Image (spheres, rainbow, N blue to C red):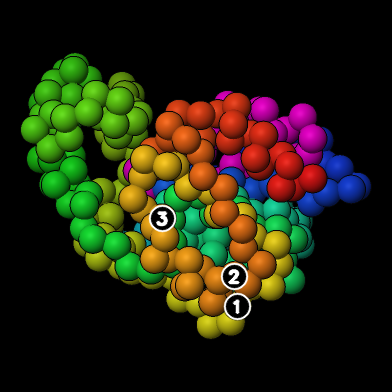
Amino acid sequence: MALVLNYTSIGTASPDSPPLVLLHGLFGSSENWVSRAKAMAAERLVISIDLRNHGASPHHDNMNYAAMTSDLSETLNASGHAEVLLLGHSMGGKVAMQFACQFPERVKKLIVVDIAPRPYAPTHQQILDAMSRIDLSQLTRRSDADSTLAAAEPDPATRSFLLKNLSRSGQGYQWQLNLPALNTHYGKLLEAPTLQQPYGGETLFIKGKNSDYLQNKDSQLVHQWFPKASLKVIDGAGHWPHASKPAVFDHIVSRFLG
């Protein structure tokens, strides 16, 4: 069953350009893209989407790229957008690639950030396990959750990113993420997107130079499915180039979108 996803819009629709749709990565949400959306909204309408089981979007027991692609189609239908500019990071990049290949008439231009159309190793399982071990019923301070995650993720910035999914209400802390579904279907998220036909539109792949998610060996596969693909590498950036080098990232995106 396709879901209508939560999304936020900023900027003004332009007769010269379809809206730019932003898709976050695993453990992320539309909130991670607020600053970039504001910067890009100077030129067009920008729509930031929470993928299923993330952010404020509905939870569902199923989690795979076919389902997330259907969600995106359903959400764009509900918001009245037949054609978009599509940008996806990491897991969101896989959704964007599958959507563009499945619905090429709906994607004017495609941007894929630091991911390739291939399977990946299970590098997040330790983090998922650590997040699942946190007893929310006993949690009184966010710092206690941070301490639990430290054994699985030593980088404070990454832990801070993960803990943005921890919200507090009158009943205590709760995860916005659907952790059980992510744990159950994590293997499916590591798989390559299902691409049945090449996307012939203009495509830009953006790589953080210090990241190994997008490698030279991926070039042949990328051009097999995205024959008009070009590549930009951002020096000094890792897997989140939009966060570590925002001005450079915005300039690259703006030039590509025109």
Image mark for residue 198: 1
Q: Position of residue 209 (x, y in %)?
A: 42, 42
Q: Are marks 1 and 2 in contact (CB under 8 Å)?
A: yes
> Does the magenta-highlighted stretch encompass residue 48?
yes
Highlighted magenta segment, given as a residue range = 26-50
Viewer-side label of 1, 3: 3
Q: Position of residue 225 (x, y in %)?
A: 55, 74
**Element marked by disc 1:** loop
Q: CA distance from mark 1 to mark 2?
A: 6 Å
Amino acid type, residue under disc 3 in the picture: Leu
Amino acid type, residue under disc 2 in the picture: Phe
Amino acid type, residue under disc 1 in the picture: Pro
Q: CA distance from mark 1 to mark 3?
A: 19 Å
Image mark for residue 226: 2
Q: Which residue occupies 51% across, 68% down?
A: 222
**What residue sits right under mark 3 in the picture?**
214
> Does the magenta-highlighted stretch encompass residue 123?
no
